Amino acid sequence: MTLRLHNTLTRRKEAFVPLDPKNVRMYVCGPTVYDYAHIGNARPVIVFDVLFRLLRHIYGENHVTYVRNITDVDDKINARAAERAKGRNISVLEAARELTEETARIYNDDVAALGCLPPTHTPRATDNIGEMIAMIETLVKAGFAYVAQGHVLFDVSKKADYGKLSHRSLDEMIAGARVEVAPYKKNPMDFVLWKPSDANTPGWESPWGRGRPGWHIECSAMSARYLGETFDIHGGGIDLVFPHHENEIAQSEGAHHNHPLARYWVHNGFLQVEGEKMAKSLGNFVTIHDLLRDWPGDVLRFNMLRTHYRQPTDWTVAGMKESWKILERWYDMAGADSSPRAGGGFLDALSDDLNTPQAIAELHRADANDLAGGLMLLGFDPMPVRLVSKKPVDAVEISRAIGARNAARKAKNFKEADRIRDELLAQGIQLKDNPDGTTSWEVKR
RNA sequence: GGCCACGUGGCGGAGUGGUGACGCAGCGGUCUGCAAAACCGCGUACCCCGGUUCAAUUCCGGGCGUGGCCUCCA
């Protein structure tokens, strides 16, 4: 069994060989905490949680370091914070802190409900401003960056292989550009490392005056701090390939004597909702938080894993119902005394670039113990109680009704027995007469 | 406009240069007072047009469709 991963750098599946099997290192871009995360945001979180678990399975629980940052400095945050601060006796900075703390807390709760393990480190950008400033200084000294009108910009013309991740040349990018270029840029593709902040915008003192970091530098600074100059896997959504990850590479390699930033770049595909792109204007913007109100987290997680991570996927209610049905049956039949493990075909599938649909197919063929072990490796805890519907039900009333129905059945009064069953069904309660003579029930969706 | 990805049966979704994975739904059966659940059985799909090949859903070219990036939206 060899783990193979699709590497965006080469656009091929490659055998995964860690730099240090005693410390396999992975970085995944985390949320910008200004609002509830949507279901599209959940995809990388779940996908890379599965990869984290697989790496732990292969290399040992204590031999994998997983870092997922929290972006808590950002102009969208600043805009929201300004709104919050209005009419209250707090500064924009305080309001920003309040907003990001609150949003990050909800995010962590939601992600935990999706069955995701906490990463080894979840650094916040604002706790790493010093590291960012130091890296920017290095880049300026090395000639990769320049100062212009209070901004510090990365000079892409100094990085000969700029574009190697997204596989486009500078010429192509300039030809396709639709944006107006800021006048202080030497090259249209140059990007901001540091920008000035006014008095009402969060900012930090720096060699270039009071300001705040550009978007990309935080990931370069934090990955270096927690994982070193070169680490094994860098993950995220495919939309981050350009410009975010391309720019991370430029910064990190520029600051680190051209040592590669990450050896395997892994990106998940995009998600649509009910056949349409998800957009606030279309009114189909689905947050994780809202979904968790109606569906067990395990069902969301399973639904996500039914599609290969690089494939585009369509998020539908029909799919969620199907997922619930499958999980419910599995949780009923899974062996209780198992631990995370993987039989032959299952592990082969997972190891082949995280082919979760194939792995799930293997589980359909597995016995009770392999099923439980495989589910646990995928991050499911096969306990029927985890799938209990969020719909409120009166269990006492239901068992009373079941008693009455069974009495009627005993008396061969089937008309009355069926009336009771239909009445419960009308309330969404489906009865099941088990072969051993008992009667159980479940909430029908 | 430039660059890129994807298009498989009613639905979801793997995979492969050559006798139709897997699941959901559906149909038939066992079980049941009848159902439900469970179990057993049932399916000649690969967007269109060319090309390569003994053979293409699988490789190549073109088209159409959907989506992504080029605007700090995963």
Image (cartoon, coloured by chain):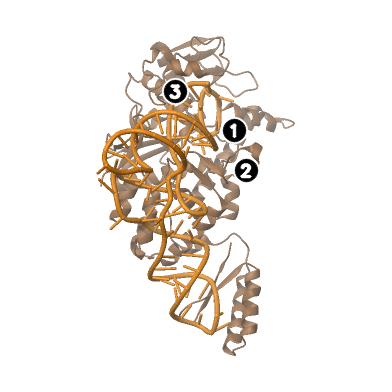
Chain colours: A brown, B orange
Instruction: Please say if the residues under marks 2 and 3 sit with CB atoms less than 8 Å apart.
Output: no
Image-based side of A267 in relation to A75, left or right:
left
- Above-or-below relation of A296 to A103: below
Residue holding disc 1: A97
Nearest to viewer (mark 1 / mark 3): 3
Pinpoint residue A227: horizontal percent, then vertical percent.
36, 32
Say what secondary structure mark 2 lies in: loop
Q: Chain of mark 3?
A: A
Residue holding disc 3: A247
Instruction: Please say if the residues under marks 1 and 3 sit with CB atoms less than 8 Å apart.
Output: no
Say what secondary structure mark 1 lies in: helix
Pinpoint residue B28: horizontal percent, then vertical percent.
47, 73
On-image quarter of the C terminus of chain A: bottom right
- Above-or-below relation of A111 to B42: above
Depth order, front residue of A43/A106 = A43
Instruction: Please say if the residues under marks 2 and 1 sit with CB atoms less than 8 Å apart.
Output: no
Q: Amino acid at mark 3?
A: Asn
Residue extending farthest bottom: A411
- Precedes in sequence: disc 2 or disc 1: 1
Q: Amino acid at mark 1?
A: Arg
Instruction: Give the label on residue A284, or none.
Output: 2
Give a yes or no on whether discs 2 and 3 share a subunit. Answer: yes
- Precedes in sequence: disc 1 or disc 3: 1
